[in-house]
Image (spheres, grey):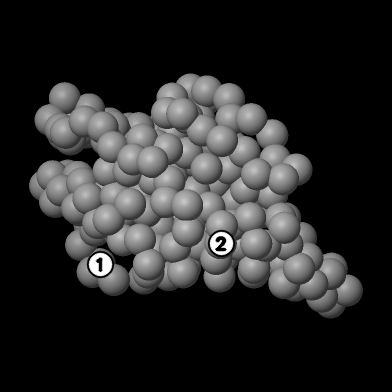
Amino acid sequence: MNKIISCLIGVSLSALALSGCAAASTTGAGSAGVASVEPSGLALIDEPAPPSDAATTAMNEFVALNQAPLGDATALIEEQFPNEFAYAFFDDSSAMHVGFAGTAPAGAVALLKGTDLPYVVIESVGFNAAEYQEAASSVGEQTRKYVTSDRQVQISQDSSIGPGAIKVSFQSDDAQYRSDPGLMKSITVDTPFRIIFDFTNTSPISTLF
């Protein structure tokens, strides 16, 4: 990861947030309908205590039983239908949301249905995964001029906010750099993509990359 800019770009299969979807959607077994959600920023929370060994084991078992089959199915969908597949993520009930550029291919829906686990299909989002990544990369390039030794800019694809959402947030150890340096007025992206500025995620500069 280039230290100049921290870009978190890619399909997220583990974002635990409910998607806001304006496009048509259908639901799989046990899943709820999709509601429209307007992002207002995510509040920072205290760092949780490390999980116990028992809790970790229980979580691993839960993931193996409830998320791994859907993750595997989604990986096959991305491989078999690259022009149609747009994104995928888990919501907070562990239902898999899968977006498609147009009508969901019958074979893709069959793969999801075959898991016998909750899923939500979002159709007609107007882009595929390659186009989504290209748009996020373009936003990343446009933010480079705002990156300094005191401030990093994070770019992430986040369709848990809504189909095609590209989230921009900042990292700095100095509070004066934790606000908009001019990005809102200067960055553009073509529809159906949209930029979401998250000014609450203003954590210190990360040393993970």
- Image point 58% across, 30% down: which residue? 34
As helix, strand or loop, the secondary structure at mark 2 comes to: helix
Q: In the rendered view, does 126 fall on the left or right side of 72?
A: left
Q: How far is disc 1 from disc 2 in space, using C-alphas? A: 39 Å
Q: Quadrant of the C terminus?
A: bottom left
Between 99 and 13, the one lying in front of the other is: 99
Residue 158 in sight: no
Residue drawn at point x = 42 percent, y = 28 percent: 23
- Taking 203 as reference, is 122 above or below it? above
Amino acid type, callout 2 = Leu
Q: Is residue 154 left or right of residue 114?
A: left
- Residue 96: image x %, image y %? 59, 51
Q: Position of residue 167 (x, y in %)?
A: 36, 41
Q: Residue at x 71, y 55 (%)?
A: 117
Residue 111's tag is: 2
- Image x and y of residue 74, in percent: 50, 62
Count of marks, rendered view? 2
The answer to whether 127 is drawn above or below residue 208 in the figure is above
- Please state which of residues 110 and 140 is positioned toward the viewer in this rendering: 110
Residue 21 visible: yes
Please report whichever mark, 1 or 2, sits nearer to the chain's N-terminal start. 1
Badge 1: residue crowd in 10 Å (few <14, some 14–19, many ≥20): few
For residue 3, the mark is 1
Front in this rendered view, residue 76 or 152:
76
Left or right of 86: which side holds 15?
right
Tell me the tag on residue 68.
none
Residue 183 image offset from top left, x and y in percent: 20, 33
